[in-house]
Amino acid sequence: MYCAKYHLVFATKYRRKVLKQGLGAYLLKILHNITKKFPDVEILESNTDKDHVHLLLSIPPKYSISEIVQYLKGRSAHDMRKKFPFLNKAYYGTDGIWSEGYFVSTVGINEEIIQRYIEHQGKEDSGQVSLVF
């Protein structure tokens, strides 16, 4: 028995804002297919902004985080470049569409806060802050 949940964030190379329109939705579909290779890894929450993706994952201790991230980034880059040829031009001469590295943190008592944060990625500011010039 285990409870190993992680908040994972990775960004597009050069922070290019390519995850808009249908591309972000397609990316999430690809990422959720991880269960084909890793059936015991679960994506609990997922969302994208224009230049990065947030995931809330449950990963069994038998896998390393880096192994799962490598698979997610590699598989998604391959599938997205195949489906969206313009990415080959946007990232000409580079290996992938993702920047090197990633952010990961374990999820403890703040799971609900992190889940809501991911849920609201890419949505407009709801007006809590107003700037006056």
Image: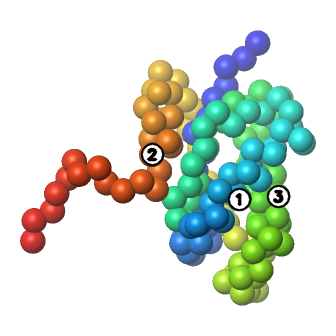
Residue tagged 1: 26
Which residue is disc 2 drawn over?
120
* Cβ atoms under marks 3 and 1 closer than 8 Å: no
Q: For the view shown, which residue lies furthest in the top direction?
A: 1
The mark found on residue 75 in the picture is 3
Check the image and name the residue furthest to the right. 37
Q: Picture coordinates of residue 93 (x, y %)?
A: 76, 86
Q: Residues within 10 Å of mark 3 (few under 14, many from 20)?
A: some
Q: CA distance from mark 3 to mark 1?
A: 12 Å
Percent x, y for residue 116?
45, 36
Q: Amino acid at mark 3?
A: Arg
Spatial CA span between label 2 and label 1: 18 Å
- Residue 59 left/right relative to 125: right
Could you say whether the residue bearing mark 1 is in a helix, strand or loop? helix
Quadrant that contains the C terminus: bottom left
Label 2 – label 3 distance at C-alpha: 25 Å
Front position among marks 2 and 3: 2
> Residues at badges 2 and 1 in contact (C-beta under 8 Å)?
no
